[in-house]
Image (tube, helix red, strand yellow):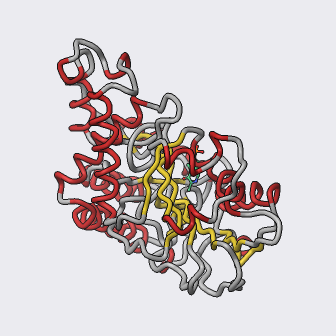
């Protein structure tokens, strides 16, 4: 087999090799059907088994109680920015948004089209370098929206806010499944698959029954959560192949020991890389406050942009790809999702130390 890159891409991102190999092995003949899963009806028995297994793995790995519904929706996490307020906001209702980066801003932008959301806190004046903990919350809000991991700015919640009886709605696109969580405070969780669960093309939405019951009626059919729950994500042709890949990836996560094993693996990688930044903070400049550091996306700057460009191109020659920071912020970003092997981070840190000696 050809050599695999050390893939630090922010998304679409690295997938576990066994999940890809399984897809390869089953590609031309899925479940003995003589067809690829790409050629199979979304209403066939063979596909149905995959659909249900993917759903069951999500519920099992996250420890969901039976009052949570898991659905697969197209349109990316970006569609959820609109579907959440479309279903839950409106006349006489309010929602609180915690603004921690570009994705939160896009989420509240959609909510403003559909209602009157409030900003509970924002770290924008400080360049989104931390997760705010002092929130101004409306006890009558329908939900509090947070972005659990800020893919561009490299911040992450390590404790979730206490919102009392108001459910949290969370965009977990870039850190779902990175560690075990207590789902109780969450009324709705959504995540595009292409960071930590699979390829682009499907978004996982988890909605608790009490919140589902509060959803507006009379919405266009495809934009109503009730449709997707009632029809078990099969109202129309679902994204069969992305869901199949999510199944492969999550079967791998389970085999590794579930989310507890993922957390151990992710902390080991994060500790190694942040340790390297902290050992030489004048050269490797991490802007993020220590208590808000992301274990999924590690961002840092070098003393100047020429050094950053040299760093990225030399790293590429050594097989490390995807290290360029988001175009809106520049610098370096190492994305280290569940599927990124420890060896990739070790290679990066060795390279960083070598690069430092030469500059
Ligand atoms: C990538 C990302 C998105 C956008 O996802 P799409 O599926 O491209 O719409 C939203 N939120 C977060 C936190 C992300 O990382």
User: How many discs appear?
Assistant: 0
> What's the residue at 75%, 59% (across, down)?
111
Image position, residue 338 (x, y; %): 32, 54
Q: Please tell me which residue lies in front, 270 or 23.
A: 23
Image position, residue 239 (x, y; %): 46, 32
Going by the image, does 50 lie left or right of 91?
Answer: left
Residue 146 visible (yes or no): yes
Q: Quadrant of residue 121?
A: bottom right
Residue 311 visible (yes or no): no
Going by the image, does 2 lie left or right of 214?
Answer: left
> What's the residue at 63%, 65% (across, down)?
214
Image position, residue 251 (x, y; %): 23, 46
> What's the residue at 71%, 71% (across, down)?
95
Going by the image, does 278 lie left or right of 125?
Answer: left
Image position, residue 60 (x, y; %): 28, 59
248 shown above or below 172: above
């Amino acid at each position: 087999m050809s050599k695999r890159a050390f893939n630090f891409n922010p998304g679409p991102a690295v997938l576990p090799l066994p999940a890809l190999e399984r897809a390869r092995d089953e590609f031309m003949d899925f479940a003995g059907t003589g067809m690829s899963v790409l050629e199979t009806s979304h209403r066939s028995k063979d596909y149905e088994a995959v659909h249900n297994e993917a759903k069951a793995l999500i519920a099992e790995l996250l420890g969901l109680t039976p009052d949570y519904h898991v659905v697969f929706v197209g349109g990316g996490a970006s569609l959820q920015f609109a579907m959440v307020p479309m279903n839950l906001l409106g006349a006489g209702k309010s929602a609180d948004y915690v603004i921690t980066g570009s994705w939160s801003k896009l989420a509240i932008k959609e909510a403003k089209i559909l209602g009157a959301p409030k900003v509970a806190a924002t770290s924008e004046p400080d360049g989104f370098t931390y997760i705010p903990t002092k929130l101004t919350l409306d006890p009558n809000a329908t939900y509090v929206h947070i972005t659990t991991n800020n893919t561009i700015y490299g911040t992450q919640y390590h404790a979730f806010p206490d919102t009392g009886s108001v459910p949290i709605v969370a965009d977990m696109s870039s850190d779902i499944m990175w560690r075990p969580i207590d789902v109780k405070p969450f009324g709705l969780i959504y995540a595009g698959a292409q960071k930590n669960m699979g390829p682009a093309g499907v978004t996982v939405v988890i909605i608790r029954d009490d919140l589902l019951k509060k959803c507006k009626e009379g919405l266009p059919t495809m934009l109503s959560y009730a449709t997707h729950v009632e029809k078990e994500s099969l109202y129309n042709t679902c994204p069969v192949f992305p869901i199949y890949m999510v199944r492969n990836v999550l079967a791998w996560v389970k085999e590794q020991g579930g989310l507890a094993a993922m957390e151990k693996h992710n902390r080991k990688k994060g500790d190694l890389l942040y340790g390297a930044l902290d050992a030489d903070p004048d050269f490797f400049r991490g802007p993020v406050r220590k208590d808000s550091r992301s274990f999924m996306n590690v961002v840092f700057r070098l003393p100047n942009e020429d050094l950053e460009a040299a760093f990225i191109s030399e790293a590429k020659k050594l097989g490390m790809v995807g290290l360029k920071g988001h175009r809106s912020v520049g610098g370096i970003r190492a994305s280290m999702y569940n599927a990124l092997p420890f060896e990739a981070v070790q290679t990066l840190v060795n390279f960083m130390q070598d690069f430092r000696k030469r500059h």
